Every structure is written in structure tokens, then in C-alpha cells.
Image (cartoon, helix red, strand yellow):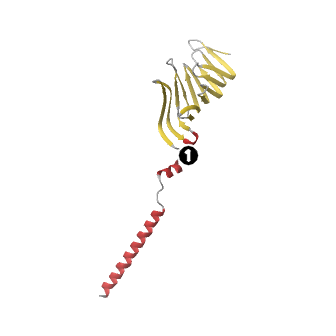
């Protein structure tokens, strides 16, 4: 009988200990309750409203594409109406069927009322416009003036000439180029073997 009482007392102590441990664990888990997905998003992507892989956006007017932007990755910052893109490619479609492309390592697109108002591309920027290829470190597009500017050193290559300089303005729709300073031109003949510098 003494052993039965001892076993019963031991079982009561073990049960109380298990209940106490369970209560402490549940209290600890409850106090470290997972926050909402919105709260977690603030920690991982500060000030980012959307994070998009394989980003693509197209502007269409009267059934015709006006411009298209694609990128490997994009982050939309709602507060500033800006999209930061990685490996972007921007394509402008002209009414006459021609197109111009601007590509870079990364870029920052500025939106105004959900419309593209400007962008800045940097890192190995390449502009291809009607058979001419521009390479530079940075290019800025201003939609209001339909103008692409490159503030730094530029190289402009075509079939018959190469142009080197500092600073460039490109009027997109009429496809006009204006090199701002330090201009050097290399003329190429048809077989591309002899070139003349000016």
C-alpha cells in the first residue's frame, strides 16, 4: 500500500511538471507570435510595395505599342512612384515602324499617374537607333521632351562612321543626335578596311 501511494504521488508530481512545462512553452510561443505578412514585408523589403521577377510593362495607344519595358527584376517604391529595375531593356516604337532600344545594367523608372515620365539607366548602357549604336555609362530619358541624354563619354557607331565625344542628346522621334563636346569622328569606307579620323 505504501508503494501504491508512492507511485500515485510520483505520477501526480510528473503530471504537474509536464503541465507546467506545457504552460511555459505555450506562453513563450504566444509571446513570440508571428507578425502579419505585411509586417514581415517591411523588414525584408523596406519601403517596397511590390517585388516583381521578369518585369514587363507596355504602353499601348490606339491599338499600337508606344513603348515597352522589360527587366529581369523590378522593385516598385510606391512612396516615390519609382521602379528600380535590373537588366532593363526599353523599346520605343515609332509610327513609321522603326524602333529604338535602350538597355543597361540597372535603372530607375519614374512614373507620373501610372505613366512613364522619365528613366535613368546606368552600367554599360547601349542605345540602338536605326542602325546606329551608342554606348555610354549612363542615359536619361525625359518623356515630356522625348529626349535621351548621356552626360559622360560616348561612342556612337554606324556603318560609315564612328563618333566619340562627351555628352549627347538624342531626340527620339525625329532621331536627331547632338554630341556636346570633345567630338572626334572616324569615317569608314564600304569595305571597312581603311578609316580616316577627323
> Does 34 sit left or right of 156 as displayed?
left
> Does 41 sit left or right of 196 as displayed?
left
Q: Percent x, y for residue 188?
A: 60, 14
Dot 1: what SS? Answer: loop
**Residue farthest toward the bottom in the current orientation of the protein:** 2
Taking 27 as reference, is 136 above or below it? above
Q: Percent x, y for residue 64?
A: 47, 23
Q: Viewer-proximal residue, 105 or 172?
A: 172
> Within 10 angstroms of label 1, few (less than 14), some, or many (20 or more) residues?
some
Q: Quadrant of the C terminus?
A: top right
Q: Residue at x 66, y 22 (%)?
A: 179
Q: Percent x, y for residue 192?
A: 57, 14
Q: Percent x, y for residue 73?
A: 50, 38
Taking 197 as reference, is 24 above or below it? below
Q: Residue at x 63, y 25 (%)?
A: 154
> Residue 180 lies in what quarter of the image?
top right
Q: Residue at x 68, y 21 (%)?
A: 183
Taking 142 as reference, is 9 above or below it? below
Q: Viewer-proximal residue, 164 or 139?
A: 139
Q: Viewer-proximal residue, 97 or 181?
A: 97
Q: Residue at x 60, y 27 (%)?
A: 144
Q: Which residue is mark 1?
A: 47
Amino acid at each position: 500500500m505504501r508503494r501504491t501511494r508512492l507511485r500515485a504521488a510520483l505520477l501526480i508530481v510528473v503530471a504537474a511538471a509536464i503541465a507546467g512545462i506545457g504552460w511555459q512553452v505555450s506562453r513563450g510561443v504566444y509571446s513570440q507570435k508571428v507578425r502579419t505578412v505585411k509586417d514581415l514585408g517591411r523588414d525584408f523589403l523596406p519601403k517596397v510595395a511590390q517585388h516583381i521577377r521578369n518585369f514587363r510593362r507596355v504602353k499601348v495607344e490606339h491599338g499600337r505599342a508606344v513603348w515597352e519595358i522589360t527587366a529581369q527584376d523590378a522593385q516598385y517604391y510606391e512612396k516615390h512612384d519609382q521602379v528600380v529595375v535590373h537588366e532593363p531593356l526599353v523599346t520605343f516604337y515609332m509610327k513609321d515602324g522603326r524602333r529604338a532600344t535602350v538597355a543597361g545594367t540597372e535603372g530607375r523608372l519614374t512614373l507620373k499617374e501610372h505613366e512613364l515620365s522619365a528613366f535613368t539607366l546606368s552600367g554599360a548602357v547601349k542605345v540602338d537607333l536605326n542602325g546606329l549604336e551608342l554606348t555610354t555609362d549612363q542615359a536619361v530619358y525625359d518623356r515630356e521632351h522625348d529626349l535621351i541624354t548621356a552626360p559622360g563619354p560616348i561612342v556612337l557607331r554606324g556603318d560609315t562612321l564612328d563618333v566619340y565625344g562627351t555628352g549627347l542628346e538624342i531626340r527620339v522621334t525625329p532621331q536627331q543626335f547632338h554630341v556636346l563636346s570633345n567630338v572626334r569622328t572616324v569615317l569608314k569606307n564600304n569595305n571597312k578596311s581603311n578609316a580616316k579620323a577627323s
